[in-house]
Image: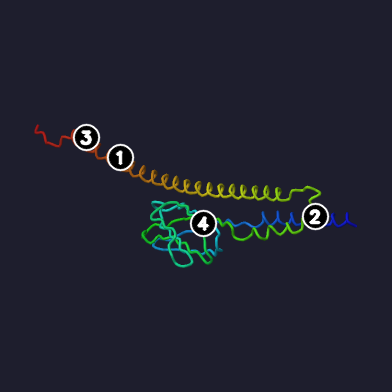
Amino acid sequence: MRWSIELLRVCVACLSLCVSVISAFSQSLDSDFTFTLPAGRKECFFQGMKKDASLEIEYQVLDGASLDVDFHLHSPSGHVVASDYRKSDGVHTVETEEGDYMFCFDNTFSAVSEKVIFFELILDNMGDGEESEDWKAYVQGADLLDMKLEDIMDTINSVKSRLGKSLQIQTLLRAFEARDRNLQESNYDRVNMWSCTNLFLMVIVSGIQVYLLRSLFNDNRKINT
Protein backbone atom coordinates (compact mmCIF):
# COMPACT_ATOMS: atom_id res chain seq x y z
CA MET A 1 0.00 0.00 0.00
CA ARG A 2 2.78 2.39 0.92
CA TRP A 3 4.59 1.51 -2.30
CA SER A 4 1.46 2.38 -4.29
CA ILE A 5 1.18 5.78 -2.60
CA GLU A 6 4.81 6.59 -3.32
CA LEU A 7 4.37 5.53 -6.96
CA LEU A 8 1.26 7.71 -7.24
CA ARG A 9 3.15 10.72 -5.88
CA VAL A 10 5.96 10.16 -8.36
CA CYS A 11 3.49 9.94 -11.26
CA VAL A 12 1.74 13.13 -10.18
CA ALA A 13 5.08 14.92 -9.86
CA CYS A 14 6.17 13.82 -13.34
CA LEU A 15 2.84 14.85 -14.83
CA SER A 16 3.04 18.25 -13.18
CA LEU A 17 6.59 18.69 -14.42
CA CYS A 18 5.52 17.91 -17.99
CA VAL A 19 2.70 20.42 -17.78
CA SER A 20 5.11 23.05 -16.47
CA VAL A 21 7.55 22.36 -19.31
CA ILE A 22 4.82 22.62 -21.94
CA SER A 23 3.46 25.84 -20.50
CA ALA A 24 6.95 27.29 -20.24
CA PHE A 25 7.60 26.82 -23.94
CA SER A 26 4.10 27.56 -25.24
CA GLN A 27 3.54 30.90 -23.49
CA SER A 28 5.77 33.56 -25.00
CA LEU A 29 5.95 37.08 -23.63
CA ASP A 30 7.93 38.40 -26.57
CA SER A 31 6.21 40.05 -29.53
CA ASP A 32 7.24 42.13 -32.53
CA PHE A 33 5.43 44.23 -35.10
CA THR A 34 6.27 46.10 -38.32
CA PHE A 35 4.11 48.95 -39.61
CA THR A 36 4.17 51.94 -41.97
CA LEU A 37 4.04 55.40 -40.41
CA PRO A 38 2.74 57.96 -42.95
CA ALA A 39 4.30 61.40 -43.29
CA GLY A 40 3.04 63.92 -40.76
CA ARG A 41 1.42 61.25 -38.59
CA LYS A 42 1.86 59.89 -35.06
CA GLU A 43 1.00 56.32 -34.02
CA CYS A 44 0.64 55.11 -30.42
CA PHE A 45 0.42 51.60 -28.94
CA PHE A 46 -0.57 50.34 -25.48
CA GLN A 47 0.77 47.47 -23.37
CA GLY A 48 -0.73 46.39 -20.06
CA MET A 49 1.84 45.66 -17.36
CA LYS A 50 1.92 44.37 -13.78
CA LYS A 51 3.71 45.90 -10.84
CA ASP A 52 7.44 45.16 -10.47
CA ALA A 53 7.62 43.63 -13.96
CA SER A 54 10.08 44.56 -16.70
CA LEU A 55 9.26 46.08 -20.08
CA GLU A 56 11.89 46.28 -22.82
CA ILE A 57 11.16 48.05 -26.11
CA GLU A 58 13.51 47.98 -29.07
CA TYR A 59 12.71 49.72 -32.36
CA GLN A 60 14.34 50.35 -35.74
CA VAL A 61 13.43 52.46 -38.75
CA LEU A 62 13.69 50.09 -41.71
CA ASP A 63 12.85 52.43 -44.58
CA GLY A 64 12.19 56.09 -45.27
CA ALA A 65 14.14 59.30 -45.82
CA SER A 66 16.92 59.81 -43.25
CA LEU A 67 15.77 56.66 -41.37
CA ASP A 68 14.72 58.66 -38.30
CA VAL A 69 11.67 58.97 -36.03
CA ASP A 70 10.69 60.45 -32.66
CA PHE A 71 9.86 58.01 -29.84
CA HIS A 72 8.10 58.54 -26.50
CA LEU A 73 7.24 56.06 -23.72
CA HIS A 74 4.57 57.10 -21.19
CA SER A 75 3.82 55.46 -17.84
CA PRO A 76 0.21 54.73 -16.70
CA SER A 77 0.32 57.98 -14.69
CA GLY A 78 1.12 59.96 -17.84
CA HIS A 79 4.81 60.68 -17.17
CA VAL A 80 7.34 60.38 -19.99
CA VAL A 81 9.82 57.69 -18.88
CA ALA A 82 11.84 57.51 -22.13
CA SER A 83 12.13 59.57 -25.30
CA ASP A 84 14.24 59.77 -28.47
CA TYR A 85 14.36 62.48 -31.13
CA ARG A 86 15.19 61.89 -34.79
CA LYS A 87 16.85 58.50 -34.17
CA SER A 88 16.96 55.43 -36.41
CA ASP A 89 16.90 52.87 -33.56
CA GLY A 90 16.73 52.61 -29.80
CA VAL A 91 16.36 50.29 -26.79
CA HIS A 92 14.60 51.16 -23.53
CA THR A 93 14.02 49.01 -20.43
CA VAL A 94 11.84 50.12 -17.51
CA GLU A 95 10.64 48.61 -14.24
CA THR A 96 6.87 48.88 -14.50
CA GLU A 97 3.93 49.73 -12.30
CA GLU A 98 0.36 48.46 -12.59
CA GLY A 99 -1.45 49.83 -15.64
CA ASP A 100 -1.21 50.47 -19.38
CA TYR A 101 1.99 51.84 -20.84
CA MET A 102 1.77 53.93 -24.02
CA PHE A 103 4.59 54.25 -26.54
CA CYS A 104 4.35 56.49 -29.58
CA PHE A 105 6.25 56.91 -32.85
CA ASP A 106 6.11 60.47 -34.20
CA ASN A 107 6.73 61.37 -37.85
CA THR A 108 5.06 64.78 -37.80
CA PHE A 109 8.37 66.52 -38.56
CA SER A 110 8.38 64.92 -42.05
CA ALA A 111 5.89 66.30 -44.55
CA VAL A 112 6.82 64.00 -47.44
CA SER A 113 8.49 60.74 -46.43
CA GLU A 114 6.73 57.82 -44.74
CA LYS A 115 8.66 55.45 -42.47
CA VAL A 116 8.62 51.68 -42.08
CA ILE A 117 9.17 50.91 -38.38
CA PHE A 118 9.88 47.62 -36.61
CA PHE A 119 9.58 47.26 -32.84
CA GLU A 120 9.82 44.37 -30.37
CA LEU A 121 8.42 44.05 -26.85
CA ILE A 122 10.02 41.80 -24.21
CA LEU A 123 8.03 41.32 -21.00
CA ASP A 124 9.61 39.78 -17.89
CA ASN A 125 8.31 38.93 -14.41
CA MET A 126 4.67 38.99 -15.46
CA GLY A 127 3.59 36.56 -12.69
CA ASP A 128 3.94 33.25 -14.52
CA GLY A 129 6.49 32.08 -11.97
CA GLU A 130 3.81 31.49 -9.33
CA GLU A 131 1.94 29.05 -11.52
CA SER A 132 5.11 27.25 -12.55
CA GLU A 133 5.95 26.58 -8.88
CA ASP A 134 2.73 24.62 -8.20
CA TRP A 135 4.46 21.35 -9.02
CA LYS A 136 6.46 21.57 -5.77
CA ALA A 137 3.31 20.83 -3.74
CA TYR A 138 3.16 17.34 -5.26
CA VAL A 139 6.72 16.21 -4.76
CA GLN A 140 6.68 15.97 -0.94
CA GLY A 141 7.54 12.45 0.06
CA ALA A 142 9.33 11.57 -3.16
CA ASP A 143 12.81 12.43 -1.90
CA LEU A 144 13.77 8.73 -1.83
CA LEU A 145 14.01 8.72 -5.63
CA ASP A 146 16.41 11.69 -5.57
CA MET A 147 14.88 13.19 -8.71
CA LYS A 148 16.11 16.73 -8.07
CA LEU A 149 13.16 18.34 -9.80
CA GLU A 150 14.33 21.79 -8.83
CA ASP A 151 17.55 21.30 -10.78
CA ILE A 152 15.53 20.08 -13.75
CA MET A 153 13.28 23.14 -13.62
CA ASP A 154 16.29 25.45 -13.34
CA THR A 155 17.80 23.83 -16.42
CA ILE A 156 14.52 24.11 -18.32
CA ASN A 157 14.16 27.78 -17.41
CA SER A 158 17.75 28.42 -18.51
CA VAL A 159 17.11 26.72 -21.86
CA LYS A 160 13.90 28.70 -22.28
CA SER A 161 15.69 31.96 -21.56
CA ARG A 162 18.45 31.20 -24.04
CA LEU A 163 15.98 30.13 -26.72
CA GLY A 164 14.06 33.37 -26.20
CA LYS A 165 17.27 35.37 -26.48
CA SER A 166 18.21 33.50 -29.66
CA LEU A 167 14.79 34.24 -31.14
CA GLN A 168 15.17 37.90 -30.22
CA ILE A 169 18.60 38.10 -31.88
CA GLN A 170 17.30 36.41 -35.03
CA THR A 171 14.39 38.86 -35.20
CA LEU A 172 16.74 41.83 -34.81
CA LEU A 173 19.06 40.42 -37.48
CA ARG A 174 16.10 40.14 -39.87
CA ALA A 175 15.21 43.75 -39.10
CA PHE A 176 18.80 44.86 -39.77
CA GLU A 177 18.79 42.88 -43.00
CA ALA A 178 15.52 44.51 -44.12
CA ARG A 179 16.84 47.99 -43.34
CA ASP A 180 20.13 47.34 -45.18
CA ARG A 181 18.27 45.92 -48.17
CA ASN A 182 15.98 48.95 -48.35
CA LEU A 183 19.00 51.26 -48.08
CA GLN A 184 20.84 49.39 -50.83
CA GLU A 185 17.80 49.49 -53.12
CA SER A 186 17.44 53.22 -52.50
CA ASN A 187 21.12 53.80 -53.29
CA TYR A 188 20.82 51.61 -56.39
CA ASP A 189 17.91 53.67 -57.72
CA ARG A 190 19.75 56.91 -56.91
CA VAL A 191 22.92 55.74 -58.70
CA ASN A 192 20.91 54.69 -61.76
CA MET A 193 19.10 58.03 -61.88
CA TRP A 194 22.28 60.08 -61.69
CA SER A 195 24.05 57.79 -64.17
CA CYS A 196 21.27 58.29 -66.71
CA THR A 197 21.34 62.05 -66.06
CA ASN A 198 25.11 62.22 -66.56
CA LEU A 199 24.88 60.11 -69.71
CA PHE A 200 22.21 62.42 -71.14
CA LEU A 201 24.30 65.51 -70.35
CA MET A 202 27.40 63.92 -71.90
CA VAL A 203 25.51 63.20 -75.12
CA ILE A 204 24.25 66.80 -75.27
CA VAL A 205 27.72 68.25 -74.56
CA SER A 206 29.28 65.96 -77.18
CA GLY A 207 26.73 67.11 -79.77
CA ILE A 208 27.41 70.76 -78.97
CA GLN A 209 31.18 70.22 -79.24
CA VAL A 210 30.83 68.50 -82.62
CA TYR A 211 28.63 71.31 -83.88
CA LEU A 212 31.09 73.98 -82.73
CA LEU A 213 34.07 72.17 -84.29
CA ARG A 214 32.29 71.81 -87.62
CA SER A 215 31.31 75.45 -87.57
CA LEU A 216 34.96 76.45 -87.22
CA PHE A 217 35.86 74.78 -90.53
CA ASN A 218 32.85 76.02 -92.48
CA ASP A 219 33.79 78.98 -94.71
CA ASN A 220 30.64 80.67 -95.88
CA ARG A 221 32.42 83.63 -97.49
CA LYS A 222 31.69 84.18 -101.18
CA ILE A 223 34.68 84.03 -103.56
CA ASN A 224 34.57 86.25 -106.68
CA THR A 225 35.94 84.59 -109.79
Secondary structure, mark 3, is helix
Is residue 171 or residue 48 the one in the foreground?
A: 48
Q: What kind of residue is marked 3?
A: Leu
Determine contact: label 4, label 2, CB under 8 Å.
Answer: no
- The 10 Å Cα crowd at callout 2, few under 14, some 14 to 19, many 20 or more, is few
Q: Residues within 10 Å of mark 4 (few under 14, many from 20)?
A: some
The reply, left or right, for residue 113 in relation to residue 76 is left
Of mark 3 and mark 2, the one earlier in the sequence is: 2
Residue 138 appears in which quarter of the rendering? bottom right
Query: Residue under circle 2?
Result: 141
Which quadrant is the C terminus positioned in?
Answer: top left
Estimate the spatial distance between the alpha carbons at disc 4 and disc 1, rounded to whole Å. 43 Å
- Between marks 3 and 2 in the image, the one whose residue lies nearer the viewer: 2
| Residue contact between numbered discs 3 and 2, judged by CB atoms under 8 Å | no
Query: Which mark is drawn over residue 78?
Result: none
Measuring from the top left, give residue 130's x and y in whole percent. 66, 60
Query: Residue at 53% across / 46% down in the picture?
Result: 173
**Residue carrying label 4:** 34
Label 2: element kind: loop
Work out how far the residue at label 3 is from the one at label 2, CA to CA, in angstroms.
107 Å
Residue bearing mark 1: 202
Q: Position of residue 150 (x, y in %)?
A: 71, 50
The answer to whether marks 4 and 3 mark residues whose Cβ atoms lie closer than 8 Å is no
**Which numbered tag is attached to residue 213?**
3
Sequence order check, earlier mark of 4 and 1: 4
In terms of secondary structure, where does tag 1 sit?
helix
